[in-house]
Amino acid sequence: MTKYAFVIDQRKCIGCHACTVACKAEHDVPIGVYRTWVKYIEKGEFPNSRRYFLVNRCNHCDDAPCVAICPTKALYKRSDGIVDFDANRCIGCKSCMQACPYDALYIDPYSHTAAKCNYCAHRTEVGMEPACVVVCPVHAIVAGDMHDPHTEIARIIAREPVRVRKPEQGTKPNVYYVGAEEAAINPEVAVEELPHMTMWSTLLKPHYEDESAIDMGKSLRPLQTINSLKPYRPVEAVRREAADAHVVYDTPKNTAPWGWKVAAYLATKALGAGVMMVAALALALYGLQGTLSGTMNALL
């Protein structure tokens, strides 16, 4: 049976963000949110310093928690291993974001529905490779059927020592890394207190109260960022207290996405389910009563 997966060779990756840009272009991903992104880690001090990269995305898990928790079945596991989503069924409750240990999902700021990497399913179905694979200038990203021994991805997995992100979560991810630096793949190793480098891509599109203000160049509301960095101590203090590695660039994390809206949704869902159960029970009892009355009349 076909099972699609990714292999990302971090020995080749140059951190160019070509995969990120191609993904955004292919799926029209808004500014400020990502389906695939690159994390930068630096180790050592000049002149013995080095930068490492880690490409992140949905892991298309065999035991995907986002699929299990979705109340509308908007997220689903396909027979070919791809975890896909149906935006028309999504209600934007953020349950999937809360469940995913890889920060792979986001809420589209325009459609207000969840989205993520879907392995470029529309391309895969017609025999094409995902957009990120096509544009990678060093062929660091390999996609294909890992169950077919003749594919490149199957040969790499069989030949190279591969790792996955957060195996302790038990999700059985299907994005495999070759040569990933421990500080990059293990979120508990690198220090994140240093100020991250910021790119324009970490900012959301400007929001205007009046769309005509765009032509006039008058921003009625400033750029809103979803990258809320923690206050940081002086670099020297962090270096004294921390290990060798530190994060120098990463995308915003989906920290505690649930709020009062989700609590209200769960409460109203419970009330609605209760009302429907009472109505169904009353209808069943009414039907049973009618049946008994008809039987008694027939006997009399």
Image (spheres, rainbow, N blue to C red):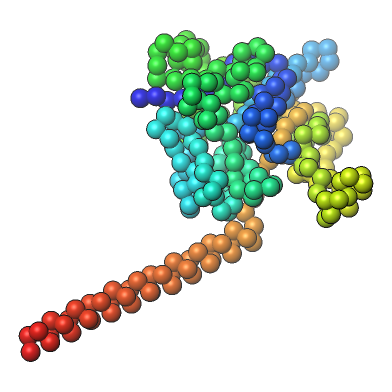
Q: From what the image shows, is residue 290 above or below residue 14?
A: below
The total number of labels drawn is 0
Q: Position of residue 90 (x, y in %)?
A: 54, 50
Residue 258 visible in the displayed image: yes
The quadrant in which residue 182 appears is top right
Is residue 255 something one can see in this rendering?
no
The residue positioned 75% from the left and 22% from the top of the image is 42
Residue 82 is situated, as x and y percent measured from the top left of the image, at 47, 32
For the point 7% across and 89% down, the residue is: 300
Q: In this view, does 257 lie to the left or right of 158?
A: right
Give above or below for 218 relative to 102: below
Q: In this view, does 199 lie to the left or right of 283?
A: right
Residue name at image x 61 percent, y 26 percent: 185
Residue placed furthest toward the bottom = 300
Q: Where is residue 96 drawn, in percent x and y?
A: 55, 46
Question: Where the N terminus falls, by quadrant?
Answer: top left
Q: Position of residue 201 (x, y in %)?
A: 77, 34
Residue drawn at point x = 82 percent, y = 43 percent? 231
Which residue reaches farthest left? Answer: 299
Asked whether 186 or 138 is in front, the reply is: 138
